[in-house]
Amino acid sequence: MRFSKFLKVEADIVVARHALVMDETKSKAEPVIFLHPEFAKRSGVNDGDVVEVEANGRIVKLKVKLSDKAPESGGVIPNGIYASYLTNFDGFKRFKANIEVSEGELTSVEELLGKIKS
Amino acid sequence: MIMICPGCSCLCDDVYIKEGKVFNACRRGKEIFAKYNENRAVARVDGREVDVDTAIEKAVEILKEAKNPAIYGLDTTVVEAQKIAIDVAEKLNGYIDDNSSFCLGELVEAVLKGEMPTTTLDEVRDNAYVLVYWGTNPYHSLSRHLSKYTYYPRGKKRPRGYDEDRFLVVVDVRRSETAVLAKKNARFIRVDDDAELVDSFVKVVEGKAAKYAKDAGVIINEMKRADFNVIFGGLGLKYGLKDLNQFKEMVKKLNEVAPVYFIPAGFHGNMRGFNETLFERVGHVNKYSFRDGKSDEEFAFTELLKNEKIDAALIVGTDPVYSLPFEVSSKLGKINTIVVDPRMSFTARIADVVIPSAISGVEAGGTMVRSDGVRVKLEPLEEKEVNDVYILNKIKEGL
Amino acid sequence: MALNPMDIYKLLPKTNCKKCGEATCMSFAFKLLNREKKLEDCKPLYEDKKYERQRKKLEEMLKPLEEATETGLIVDESLCTGCGNCVVVCPVHVEKDPKGAAVGNGPTIDDPILRVEDGVVKVINMQACRRYGKNRVLCVVCRENCPSDAIRFLEG
């Protein structure tokens, strides 16, 4: 039983380039968030979990990877369409988000493109 | 054949391709060469595939009919194409801007105006002692920055390289990969508010107490030991400080006690080229309105979009749908968009007109400007006729 | 996952029986790590049933030895960004390639130890590494300057 399922936690998000998940051909984007292992542990999130990340009233579902290079009070979202969807210019490279363990499909690029086009 | 890698503003000049393998380029650089044929753009008008000339004609029509057109992007193309793009903006009496208006444009401008002393990466390699990386994690954004130009290489006056002849400082809100490298002869400063550290450097020079007095004191003492020190500032610095003037003042203050140079660290292959090209032409580095004859915050592409001040955009070699906040990018769907890009970018997928172009540095030659202002000539592996210069010239003639 | 001789030693019989040709089990542990001895050289471990559990643990523990290069260097390409720090810091490169790797460029010598190929570091010529052969030294400079753990050594 994982009680964390019902808990939302606040996280500090840093948006940064990540050479391992960048696509120079501009064809795809990886729906991933790198959480600090300590933060993940405290929040009941595991490596490989799907999490809902909410900021500025917008939500994306991302896959969790652990990284000790992330901020201890949260994580890094690689710059790209997922980070861009959540952020505003006020907190372009650094913002607060709510994170919650979730299930189901990760947010697809097509879904976000649809929202931009509509 | 030795190639220049157009992947980022390092413009590495020792990359070569042999027997189908890319040598010396970092992971991102290699992708540009190895995957040059993937996800290529196709000419489109309103979702229908057309030939390139039809797409260009449609683009001209949209721009001619637009009341308030803007040209945006241009940071991955060559100076030669940037010049024509500026001509197009002038002819349209419209706006022109690039990524630098929300990236490091302000810092490049300060350097071009001589508000901060600057130097080249080659000089850094040969002479620099204290290297400060502030709000940037080059390990991911400019992967070879430390190994090729700054911390690790042996230089003329620094024959032992990082071993003994350099002092590395990393300032960040998190312990990034670059921060991990700050071990011996080094300092990692974790900041929450960059302004407090800026203030501390100023105060320590003035002999006053400050929050980071200890860290700043150690670093200033190291700087005093050398006749050449340099600060690299990235997006974390830009967004960590409300007012970059504080930072410029700090650099000035530090120079009272030791020579300290500044080089912007970040951005696309030829962003600085755009800044310099526009600066030469109109005296400003970005967000320029030919109609108003000036540069202003409100003319930044992102502001124009957000405030619904434009009705058409010509987007060259950049992908705003990928990189801009939703509140801005979502407005792109409401105006006429023309995308000129070698790739079927995210923006191309929602654009009204797509004009496929050549990859600068791989299929088109020309000049790019490195992050430190050094001009580099790029030779293509194979020349493609329809490149940014060709397309922009056609548009210019058509107007 | 770093291997150290103490952890190996703890699982050996610790009887200093000398059947492997070494004076002590500790010295055997060192030789195992350096791949100068094989686990099978420890006869009691295989002959005496009471060591079976320890033997299985050791076999598991020593598995990475097979994947590693002859100097114990392990490269995980999936973690490498091709930054080239390892290529530039390598003391052998600095000495042999003063115009290439030593000053930050890609190697200009034909047989560098490490080279960035297709965006990730590859081991080209392990024999030139200071960790190789009789007069080896336990140099870890390349690993120390790899911030993503793409480079590791068996011993840590």
Image (spheres, coloured by chain):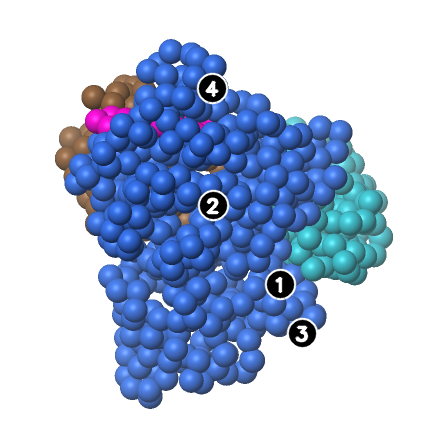
Chain colours: A brown, B blue, C cyan
- Helix, strand or loop at mark 2: helix
Q: Which residue is mark 1?
A: B122
Give percent across and percent down for residue B143. Answer: 54, 48
Q: Which residue is mark 3?
A: B157
Q: Nearer the viewer, mark 3 or mark 4?
A: 4
**Residue drawn at point x = 48 percent, y = 82 percent:** B258
Which quadrant of the figure has residue B111? bottom left
Q: Of the two numbered discs 3 and 2 on the same chain, state the one appearing first in sequence.
A: 2
Residue under label 2, please give it.
B83
Q: Residue at x 52, y 35 (%)?
A: B389
Mark 3–mark 2 Cα distance, whole angstroms, equals: 39 Å
Compute the Cα span from label 3 to label 4. Answer: 55 Å
* Segment colored magenta: B333-345
* Res. B246 visible in picture: yes
Q: CA distance from mark 1 to mark 3?
A: 12 Å
Q: Are marks 4 and 2 in contact (CB under 8 Å)?
A: no
Identify which residue, B131 or A39, lies in the foreground.
B131
Question: Which residue type carries mark 2?
Answer: Lys
